[in-house]
């Protein structure tokens, strides 16, 4: 027996019997409580909630069939911590420590709902008892995230009970490597890491490469600001990634794989390590897997903390212990990659889709999405949006449906201004294109990209020049500096944008930014440099008036760039409470009781404290 309490699986038949055996051990009347411990809920105390539910289960006694599970990200992070009670799929949101006892007493033991913890639609006021009734989930179609929220990621038996590793069993017993690649080709699966390259074409090229050994790599170096798609999969269902890698390795002819994980994701590393150990104990990794001639091992490597290491050749250089610097693309990694051997690299989400394609067929997957963009895509929906979180939607869905139906729209009565997709090298798409389809080709036409799946929503108070400056600064800091174009052109872009946001812009600056963008796209070595100008050029394309206002009028229309607006007190709204006067560090505010206060513009340092502190919104940006 292994540490898991199960014998090492010596054959495919033993694995195929295991789900039924596991389910038979759990009585049909048993109940379970699932506590989301994903990153969004964890920061709000979900781990402690899970511990309290475990204590409650223990104190309930052995005669009560209840199980507490810490599960992966459920998606609706804005309303976390999230707790689900099964059976019934009862959804509780914003659960706090004092609520644990009440949920256990009323719902788990008593079968009654705790009404105040149910999700309430902010638009209609209608409450939802279950997940299916919540608008955030209705539009979604989950494949890569299918088991998030259902299984305990620390228990391989949970994954197997849900059909996990059945795709691997099917491949090893019924399919040749070429048949596996053909099924992925029929599916039309394209890389979810940003490039969108056809997965099957990459696998076939690597398989046909003459040299050996061959390597497979999972890219978990998710470095985009605001993105946490891969993290949620690695932490919520690490076995789906491992199973996908195993299937890809069998198809390619590899015996060694690597998972390269961002160093800032310690929990992802911990979950993957535990999953690999459990898979090895059961005979799903190592020599002669499931009694076949297929052998494969996986090693985890932590990233070096550099954004550029998300680029395939830079990642491989880092794996080899060298600086993470890209190389020229004329030598393909499928022919000469890691240690100059044939290497196949896909990102976390791509690998997680593979078991579903094998189990349900390539035609099923190809039936979802658009002609050239098949399947679903996971996005992290953040920014000025009511329902921030993690969503998985069919390719081809409109931006409007994601932002308005799933995201709930822009809060506080503000006007939607733009959505930035594709990470720091993506572009900003304005309201006029909200009905555009979300797929690889359509987003590129709009001056943005799919990227790995970051989606940042901005409202009317966002300065688009400042947005371009933010992402340019990020890319300048993260550039490896290997090629002169990227190193120098980004620095010059940053210099120009900084001047513009400080009111020091000059006529001709916008044209110079365009010249630098052409230079970067045409001569930079890797995708970081070639696409670095996207945030700048997309904001110029759609928001040229804001650049002109900064340069010609020395004014920031969004009132975000310090020095290009001023603070004034509305005398009609001012209650003369004195809060702003007492808070001002520059003594720039004067006024007496019952007399509206006034800001001395000569003394004002534009620190904004008066605007933040005023309880009556009497301080205005003008």
Image (tube, grey):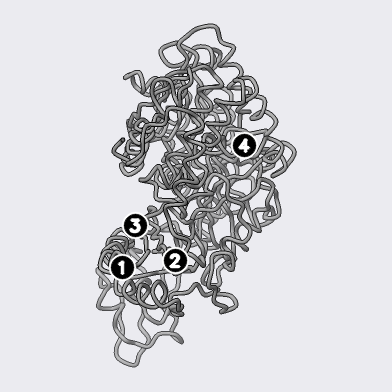
The residue beneath circle 3 is 42
Question: Circle 4 — which element?
Answer: helix
How far separated are the C-alphas under marks 2 and 4?
Answer: 30 Å
* 10 w.r.t. 127: above or below: above
Q: Position of residue 81 (x, y in %)?
A: 39, 64
Residue at (37% x, 45% y) in the render: 155
The answer to whether the residue labelled 3 contacts the one labelled 1, judged by CB atoms less than 8 Å apart, is no
Give 479 or 590, whichever is nearer the viewer: 479
Residue at (48% x, 19% y) in the render: 294
Instruction: Answer whether residue 495 is visible to the viewer in this image.
Output: no
The answer to which quarter of the image holds residue 427 is top right
Question: Circle 1 — which element?
Answer: loop
Query: Which residue occupies the extreme right position in the image?
Result: 371
Q: Position of residue 411 (x, y in %)?
A: 52, 68
The residue beneath circle 2 is 85
Q: Could you classify mark 2 by the number of other residues whose Cα lies within 10 Å: few (under 14), some (14-19), or many (20 or more)?
A: many
Counting residues from the start of the chain, the first of labels 2 and 4 encountered is 2
Instruction: Find residue 501 and name its label.
Output: none
Give 73 or 482, whichever is nearer the viewer: 73
Question: Circle 3 — which element?
Answer: helix
Instruction: Find residue 603 and name its label.
Output: 1
Q: Is residue 162 left or right of residue 101?
A: right
How far separated are the C-alphas under marks 3 and 1?
Answer: 44 Å
How far separated are the C-alphas under marks 3 and 2?
Answer: 18 Å
Q: Position of residue 125 (x, y in %)?
A: 56, 79
Instruction: Answer whether residue 351 is visible to the viewer in this image.
Output: yes
Counting residues from the start of the chain, the first of labels 1 and 4 encountered is 4
Give 539 or 529, whichever is nearer the viewer: 529
Q: Position of residue 421 (x, y in %)?
A: 56, 46
The residue beneath circle 4 is 357
Q: Could you classify mark 1 by the number of other residues whose Cα lies within 10 Å: few (under 14), some (14-19), or many (20 or more)?
A: few
């Amino acid at each position: 027996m292994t540490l898991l309490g199960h014998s090492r699986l010596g054959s495919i038949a033993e694995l195929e019997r295991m789900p039924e055996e596991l389910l038979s051990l759990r009585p049909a009347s048993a109940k379970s409580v699932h506590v989301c411990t994903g990153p969004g809920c964890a920061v709000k105390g979900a781990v402690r909630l899970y511990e309290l539910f475990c204590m409650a289960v223990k104190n309930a006694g052995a005669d009560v069939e209840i199980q507490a599970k810490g599960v992966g990200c459920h998606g609706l992070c804005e309303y976390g911590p999230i707790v689900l009670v099964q059976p019934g799929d009862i959804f509780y949101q914003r659960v706090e420590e004092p609520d644990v006892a009440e949920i256990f007493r009323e719902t788990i033991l008593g079968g009654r709902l705790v009404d105040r913890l149910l999700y309430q639609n902010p638009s209609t006021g209608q409450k939802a008892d279950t997940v299916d009734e919540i608008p955030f989930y209705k539009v979604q179609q989950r494949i890569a995230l299918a088991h998030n929220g259902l299984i305990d990621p620390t228990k391989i038996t949970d994954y197997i009970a849900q059909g996990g590793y059945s795709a691997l069993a099917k491949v090893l017993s019924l399919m040749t490597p070429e048949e596996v690649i053909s099924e992925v080709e029929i599916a039309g699966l394209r890389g979810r890491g940003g490039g969108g390259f056809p997965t099957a074409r990459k696998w076939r090229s690597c398989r046909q490469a003459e040299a050996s050994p061959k390597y497979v790599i999972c890219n978990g170096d998710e470095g985009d600001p605001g993105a946490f798609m891969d993290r949620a999969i690695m932490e919520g269902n690490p076995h789906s990634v491992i199973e996908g890698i195993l299937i890809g390795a069998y198809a390619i002819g590899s015996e060694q794989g690597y998972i390269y994980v961002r160093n800032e994701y310690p929990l992802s590393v911990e979950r993957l390590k535990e999953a690999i150990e459990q898979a090895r104990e059961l005979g799903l990794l190592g020599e002669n897997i499931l009694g076949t001639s297929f052998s494969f091992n996986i090693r985890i490597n932590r990233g070096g903390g550099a954004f550029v290491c998300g680029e395939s050749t830079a990642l491989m250089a880092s794996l080899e212990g060298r600086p993470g610097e890209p190389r020229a693309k004329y030598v393909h990694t499928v022919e000469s990659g890691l240690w100059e051997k044939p290497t196949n690299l896909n990102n976390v989400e791509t690998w997680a889709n593979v078991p579903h394609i094998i189990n349900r067929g390539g035609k099923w997957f190809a039936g979802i999405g658009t002609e050239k963009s098949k399947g679903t895509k996971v996005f992290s929906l953040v920014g000025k949006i009511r329902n921030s979180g993690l969503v998985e939607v069919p390719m081809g869905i409109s931006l409007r449906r994601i932002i308005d139906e799933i995201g709930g729209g822009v809060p506080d009565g503000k006007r939607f201004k733009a959505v930035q997709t594709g990470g720091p090298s993506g572009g900003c798409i304005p309201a006029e294109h909200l009905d555009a389809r979300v797929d690889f080709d359509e987003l590129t036409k709009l001056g943005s990209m799919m990227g790995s799946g970051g989606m940042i929503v901005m409202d009317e108070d966002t300065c688009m020049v400042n947005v371009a400056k933010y992402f340019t600064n990020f890319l300048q800091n993260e550039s490896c500096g290997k090629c002169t174009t990227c190193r120098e052109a980004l620095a010059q872009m940053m210099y120009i944008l900084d001047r513009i946001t400080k009111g020091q812009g000059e006529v001709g600056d916008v044209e110079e930014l365009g010249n630098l963008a052409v230079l970067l796209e045409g001569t930079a070595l890797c995708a970081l440099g070639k696409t670095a100008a996207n945030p700048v050029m997309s904001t110029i394309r759609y928001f040229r008036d804001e650049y002109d206002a900064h340069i010609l009028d020395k004014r920031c229309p969004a009132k975000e760039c310090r020095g290009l607006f001023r603070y004034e007190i509305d005398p009609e709204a001012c209650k003369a409470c004195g809060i702003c006067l007492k808070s001002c560090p520059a003594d720039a505010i004067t006024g007496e009781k019952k007399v509206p206060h006034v800001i001395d513009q000569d003394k004002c340092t534009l620190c904004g404290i008066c605007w933040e502190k005023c309880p009556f919104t009497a301080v205005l940006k003008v």
